[in-house]
Image (cartoon, coloured by chain):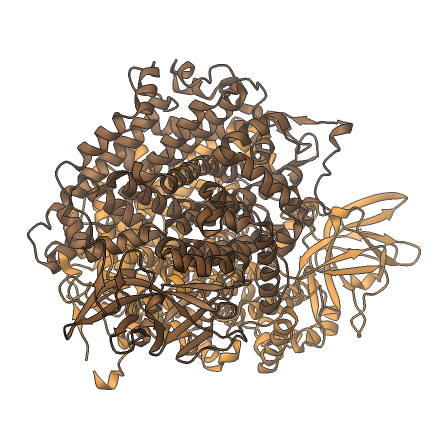
Chain colours: A brown, B orange
Amino acid sequence: MTTENDVLNADSSDSTNATAATGSAAADAAGTAQSVHPNFGRITTSGRGDAELAKSLQKILDGEWADTREETRAAMTPDLVNPLGLTMDEHRDHVMTQMQSLADSGMPKLGFKAEDGGTGDTGAALTSFELLGHLDLSVMVKAGVQWGLFGGAIANLGDAETRKKYLPGVMSLDLLGCFAMTEIGGGSDVQNLETTATFDNETGEFVINCPTPSAEKAYIGNAARDGRMAATFAQLITIEDGEELRHGVHCLLVPIRDEAGNDLPGVTTTDHGHKGGLLGVDNGRIWFDNVRVPREALLNRFGSVDEQGRYSSPIDSKGARFFTMLGTLIRGRVSVGAAAGASARTALALATRYSLIRRQFDHPETGKGIPLLEYREHQRRLMPRIARAYAYAVAQNAIVAELAEFEKNPDAFDEVRRREMETHAAGIKATVTGFANDTITEARLACGGAGYMAENLLTEMRKDCDVFSTFEGDNVVLTQLVGKELMGAYAAEFGDMDQRETVAFAINTVADVVQEKTRASTLWQKVVDAVTDREHTDILDRGNQLELLVDREEHLLETVARRLRKAQGQDGSAAFKVFNSAQDHLLQAGRAHMDSWVFARFAEAIDACEDPEAKEVLGMLCDLYVLDIVDQDKGWFLEHNRLTTERTKAATAARNRLCTKLAGRARTLVDAFAVPEFVFDVPMLNDGGVDTIEDPAEA
Amino acid sequence: MTTENDVLNADSSDSTNATAATGSAAADAAGTAQSVHPNFGRITTSGRGDAELAKSLQKILDGEWADTREETRAAMTPDLVNPLGLTMDEHRDHVMTQMQSLADSGMPKLGFKAEDGGTGDTGAALTSFELLGHLDLSVMVKAGVQWGLFGGAIANLGDAETRKKYLPGVMSLDLLGCFAMTEIGGGSDVQNLETTATFDNETGEFVINCPTPSAEKAYIGNAARDGRMAATFAQLITIEDGEELRHGVHCLLVPIRDEAGNDLPGVTTTDHGHKGGLLGVDNGRIWFDNVRVPREALLNRFGSVDEQGRYSSPIDSKGARFFTMLGTLIRGRVSVGAAAGASARTALALATRYSLIRRQFDHPETGKGIPLLEYREHQRRLMPRIARAYAYAVAQNAIVAELAEFEKNPDAFDEVRRREMETHAAGIKATVTGFANDTITEARLACGGAGYMAENLLTEMRKDCDVFSTFEGDNVVLTQLVGKELMGAYAAEFGDMDQRETVAFAINTVADVVQEKTRASTLWQKVVDAVTDREHTDILDRGNQLELLVDREEHLLETVARRLRKAQGQDGSAAFKVFNSAQDHLLQAGRAHMDSWVFARFAEAIDACEDPEAKEVLGMLCDLYVLDIVDQDKGWFLEHNRLTTERTKAATAARNRLCTKLAGRARTLVDAFAVPEFVFDVPMLNDGGVDTIEDPAEA
């Protein structure tokens, strides 16, 4: 029997339709005038959801590779869930077993082209990686290292012969490899890494060497135990006509261990041992002391050395070459964001289910315990994060689709479109991994003591996801990159762009261009046409929301550009000072851009949704997404006279009301995440102290 | 040789004195007109600090029990640092060894009165617990369970005979015990826990029973392995004249295991196994199935049962009795906040040291790598948190001193003062543990890949500290308690206060009373007298800061009281709705109170500081503390016309400038935390990729 508790409907008279409070008639435009579910806001204390609505919502989240998702989910088994209480070695063994299962299933082949022995479906490959994010992230990361990074380097940078030689072994796991880019002293400053690959004209070999302690490769997955070869990034040096020429960073395949697992001569690997999490991944250091590899070890797509030791490259500029090479490797970055998003959705689903069946403090009248989610604060903890999870999932799908399109048809991408894709890949990675860590933390806290028990998975997810904010590009560095790109994206010049040049690119027209591009979009026209609220005051009006977010981005870009222009004509020190004192401003602009970019993707997806009921719910989630941004950046909107105090207060009230309304469908909202059901077989959802979910058949 | 890098002094012309930007002459009042250190803001790239200044600052942080701190620090050894890579059982054994060392050192005796075999110095006891927070938190928590909670229950609730019988064994570790309060289905709702202790008139025994699955004791430290007895909280029931009488929650000593470690008849313990952290603490569940204990098992300070089975108590009201009993147990709560604060300071010291010697990206002119802390964003990540760490440390000391005073001289405390102490103990616990988790997370992120390696300790600290936000009172529940107390504190009635009654207590005069109390304080008079800025616009003026924070608190209390008043005369359901829809508002009021309360304690400590140099630095930290609050709640100050947009923009700019200025003394600021030096013997501070700190002798 389903018991419905109406305790939350205190405001029902004035909040049946959240738009009412804004005193606007714009609701029709957003399609939310008539609530299909009049009982939004009532917590269904049976804790069950609405299966049909969940399916419709899931369709939006599943996106283009829905079939892959279905197949992957169906193939997933409980042994992919984070195992508990294993020692580091046991966890590593366990993950290798899972890896072998994935290899045997043919999953890795999706990420490689038919000509290389793969099945060539980038979107499906990224999607199946993403879904590993619901489970043990150690498996996801190890798979990413092996197939995405190591395999990806060979596939994207190697010639046909090299690909043919190594890729079958990469896919089958006969050859385990590392992606040896990061150095302990360099971190994010990859362009200036220190390891060298010097061509020895006499022997026709490259000599790989770490010249300083800070040049040691560090944090490298597969380096501590399993890897036999490392795709090693090094400064390529040739001696031509007696002169030492430096050609920038290139990648070479360097064997590091023999079959028995012993370091090869000149190679010293070290085990990083215990980390914050990801115990199943064997991260380690690699030190190269004049290790010799044949000329063919160089992955030569963007630069090769002939038998005479002469270097040549299809790209003249060192910087352009470097960024082009990095560009081919963004799959890893996209995967990391996607898997973190999946992990956040799992955490939200766990915490939401718990909040519906765990009761705290008795109701003063019924004497029955009150489910956690009936408390306003609990709604405020979970619901805005659920709304963001939807927005980010849809935006992440857009990046995956764009990357798949690019890999299928690179010629359709001009320089601007390609760089936009790379920028958004960086931005969504920073946005979603930061969100995921915040969300898993909040989910764990929202489950109290139960949340701290490893058996309930949240702590394990948090430990593993933690480093997602750091690897594949530190989130601060990536957000800064977004800001810089927005400054420089429309300048004609390309490549070799360092801080000084970015400053020089802070041209007068930046914001104009942004505005022009955005306002020319179909979405913009569509929502603007739909606006009935001509005074532009209704914060629940989709067109006003878009304008609010884009306008903030424009203003931030304009003002940061003005600040950076001061650096023009200055020397390096002065230019750095200007740049550094505007760093927070630049980061703010980068974040604002991602907010409006994500919003636009979400709005598009809602626009395309054909189920009116799902469309209504998605509209409310989109409203909550925007209201959450307004709430968090309220100071800015007020300081810059974008919103009056009356409007920000109304926004706060509307945000609270939406939290309550959507809480009434919380279970349905998280069911649409389609996390494999066996993940929920955790003690806190079955154990003493929580309600029993009735069998639907009995209801 | 010390190299000073002036790259950060871009703004030096207008920011030598941060007050300049506010256009006010009030700087004299705050004592910061003349900077003793004209070169604030320059990063000393040697990474060394100013030992003398650090000592002066440390004196302020060390507070009343400075000698205890010195002794405790001197006695601490590297084996107290979080051990790495141990299995759960190994870690538990390791912690037991450390516990035995602490017992042998006599440390636990500090917490017990002379008449009970202790040395009776509450302040010293709490201080030594706090310092364990710099090291392995498993040791701190296990010590807290054994001596603070289990021992504390016996000491505070038991009669002389019971204390004499058990406390020596508690101190020596011959008797290991649990504090069995929390139940799996009840969590924070301790007053309504379900386990029963029913007096059997025939046998003269109590029967301890868990009547439902949700009554199982859960998350109990020492329960999985080491505990032999449990201080068990249960609903006390007597049968008097054939009638079942319920007397509310009482505590009884129940043996749970025999000497060999086997569960006693009727007792079932379960191991929680792996948790998010604190691997060295054996948390478990305890299930009681009609376990019989003698009449003497009841700790009878606030309620006893005579041989005839008749209950009596010195306190009539069940609620008052319960809260009085809980009040005697606040030591644990105070310890938890203190240790979390110590952990946060350790994290800040680790991240700050790293930020001074780890370089990232080359300076465009010098070509040398730029230390992380020279970046504005890095300063913004670390410096406001360092400022808060100072403020919270001082406020925490004030609570410790108050509690020590209370335990020495309880009669000096009237009801209001005692409840204020309890409220602030709850508030500071929530404030500092939340801060600690945020700060350790940020410190870990600020150290990039190195931060994720367990060997560098930050991840281990984060895992362990996580649950500090949940145990000893969930932070949301405690913050709400602060808000409720502020509503009800001045009402005459006491005890049995539930949500409905709190609502009823939301009397007209709440804010008036707050205002009256605050404005009557010596501090208030002192700062108001010192204000030279009669227009009250200078945000760096101490008096204006106090007014700004207190005014926000008053307004929030006033408005939440007005909302809650609507519930008067309503039935339970309606009253709950009113309460629930104001929950976020109430929490906001609770947080605002803690902000201003902490500020007042910090301002008092600065006022008392006699070293002008230290006083100047502390003044800047206090400014940054306030500016950080303003920055985070900017929307509120603008919405309520407390600050103009010009002032909030000036506050943001001043915050940035203060971050930069204080960054120039960052090492000194964290040296003053006096974290034992061996904690810094971690790879990331010594290993490849970071600068070598020169020997001071060579400088």
Q: Quick check: can you spot residue A438?
A: no
**Is A289 left, or right, of B342 in this rendering?**
left
Q: Residue B337 appears at what percent x and percent y?
A: 50, 59
Measuring 43% from the left and 65% from the top, which residue is drawn there? A220
Q: Residue at x 57, y 36 (%)?
A: A670
Task: Return the residue nearer the eye: A470 or A55.
Answer: A55
Percent x, y of residue A287: 38, 75
Residue B23 vs A215, above or below: the answer is above
Location of residue B658 by image quarter: bottom left
- Lateral position of residue A348 relative to residue A505, left or right: right
In front of the other: A598 or A26: A598
Query: Where is residue B174 drawn, in percent x and y?
Result: 71, 77
**How many badges with numbers are in the image?**
0
Residue A21 picture quarter:
top left
- Looking at the picture, does residue B396 appear above or below residue A693? below
For residue A112, above or below residue B171: above
Furthest toward the left, the residue is A569
Viewer-closest of B9 and B38? B9
Instruction: Say whether residue A497 is left or right of residue A71.
Output: left
Q: Is residue A16 above or below residue B234?
A: above
x and y, in percent, of residue A592 in the image: 31, 39
Which is nearer the eye, A126 or A242? A242
Q: In the visual, does A651 lie left or right of B22?
A: right
Residue A101 visible within the image: yes
Extreme-right residue of the structure: B202
